[in-house]
């Protein structure tokens, strides 16, 4: 039995889980609503505030799907209850970020500003008061979407190893390299 798949998902009273036809699962809560099409081989049950995921056989495919769908459903329940949040840090002289009318405007050392329009359901904020660096805060109910948006913004100017300039996750460690030494 899958160690991940056999653990039940606790569903609180404020979260509503609906299992429709063809295993279409809809989870709604105070933060929003998410839906997921689960493989028809995987069976789902809601009993006494717990969602359980089970598989029909021990085939490799069923074992893989068992843990996968349990994790995805757990992320959905946690997302509609609390939401997900990622923080990016913009480091560099002249590097700036600002949000105007829901559009993230970045000045990252290029000859032009970069405008990033976040997808539906993702909220982007900029915090400049915390320290000398600028922080970009990405929030949403879909864990995959929040991570994808954060990775996309980071990829616009990833941190470089010599001075550490660029966009990085707030908890990311960038290994620094020594620069050139003077020739004698």
Image (cartoon, grey):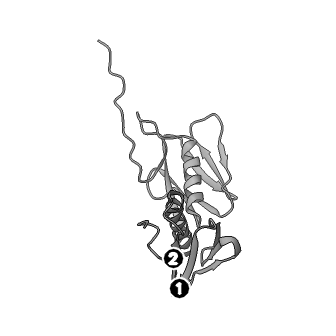
Q: How many marks?
A: 2
Which residue appears farthest toward the top when viewing the image? Answer: 184
- Quarter where residue 32 is shown: bottom right
Where 89 sits versus 82, above or below? above
Q: Are marks 1 and 2 in contact (CB under 8 Å)?
A: yes
Q: Secondary structure at mark 2?
A: strand
Which residue in the protein does label 2 denote? 52
Where 50 sits versus 36, above or below? below
User: How many residues crowd mark 1 within 10 Å: few (<14), some (14–19), many (20+)?
Assistant: few
Mark closest to the chain's N terminus, 1 or 2: 1
* Screen quadrant of the C terminus: top left
Which residue in the protein does label 1 denote? 47
> In the image, what residue occupies the spot 59% across and 47% down?
152
Of residues 34 and 119, the one nearer the viewer is: 34
* Screen quadrant of the N terminus: bottom left
Q: Is residue 125 visible?
A: no
Of residues 15 and 166, the one nearer the viewer is: 15
> In the image, what residue occupies the spot 51% across and 85% down?
49
């Amino acid at each position: 039995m899958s160690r991940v798949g056999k653990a039940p998902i606790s569903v609180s009273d404020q979260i509503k889980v609906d299992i429709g036809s063809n295993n279409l699962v809809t989870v709604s809560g105070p933060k929003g609503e998410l839906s997921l099409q689960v493989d028809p081989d995987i069976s789902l049950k809601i009993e006494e505030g717990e969602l359980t995921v089970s598989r029909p056989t021990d085939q490799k495919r069923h074992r893989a799907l068992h843990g996968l769908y349990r994790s995805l459903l757990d992320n959905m329940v946690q997302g509609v209850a609390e939401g997900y949040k990622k923080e990016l840090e913009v480091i560099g002289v002249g590097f700036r970020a600002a949000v105007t009318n829901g559009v993230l405007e970045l000045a990252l050392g290029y000859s032009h500003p970069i405008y990033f329009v976040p997808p539906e359901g993702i909220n982007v904020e900029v915090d400049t008061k915390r320290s000398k660096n600028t922080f970009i805060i990405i929030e949403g109910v879909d864990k995959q979407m929040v991570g994808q948006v954060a990775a996309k913004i980071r990829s616009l100017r990833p941190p470089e190893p010599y001075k550490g300039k660029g966009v990085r996750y707030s908890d990311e460690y960038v290994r620094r390299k020594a620069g050139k030494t003077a020739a004698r």
